[in-house]
Amino acid sequence: MVSEYFRHLDQRVSSARLSSYGNSDDDVLDVAATYIWNASISQSLYLPLSMLEITIRNRIHHVMSEHVGTEYWFLAVLHVEEMRTVHEVWSLLSKKHRTPPTAGKVLADLTLGFWPKMFEKKYHEL
C-alpha cells in the first residue's frame, strides 16, 4: 500500500520536481524518502533563517535611521534597483490598506533577498 502511494508520487508532486531527488531508474521509495527528508530539513531551517532575516533587517533599519536622520532612510539612499523593489512593496501596501505604509511595514515586507544588497560595494560609504 505504501509503495502504491509513492509509485504515483510524481502525479501528486510532479516529475520535474522529483527529478532533483533521483531519476527514473531509482527506487521510488528512495526518491520519495529523499524528497521528504529535504522538505523536513527545509522546514527545520525556516525559523532560524526567519530570525536571521529579522535581525539583519532591524539592525540595518536602526543604524540607517540614525545615520540619515529618518526612519524613511531608504528613500534617501537606495540606488535605482533597490528603490524599484521598495516602490513595488510600497505600491502593493498602499493599494491593500488604502493609506501610505509606515517605514517599518515597507521594510518588513521586503524579502530576504533584498537585504544582502545593502552590503554591496555601492553602499560601503554609508
Image (cartoon, rainbow, N blue to C red):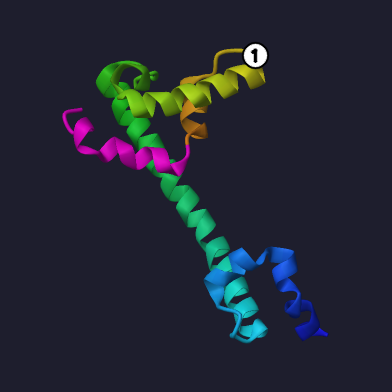
Q: Residue at x 51, y 21 (%)?
A: 90
Q: Main secondary structure of the magenta part?
A: helix
Q: Residue at x 57, y 71 (%)?
A: 19
User: x, y (%) of residue 87?
Assistant: 46, 21
Which residue is nearer to you in this view: 102 or 7? 7
Residue stretch in magenta? 111-126
Residue denoted by label 1? 98
In which quarter of the view is residue 94 placed? top right
Q: Secondary structure at mark 1?
A: loop
Quarter of the image for residue 99 reads top right
Q: Give residue 47's position: percent from left, percent from top.
A: 52, 55
Across and down, in percent, residue 83 comes to 38, 24
Left of 18 or right of it: where is 49? left
Residue 44 versus residue 63 in the image, above or below: below
Furthest residue to the right?
1
Residue in the picture at 60% in, 70% down: 18
Depth check, front residue: 77 or 48: 77
Residue at image coords 35%, 16%: 70
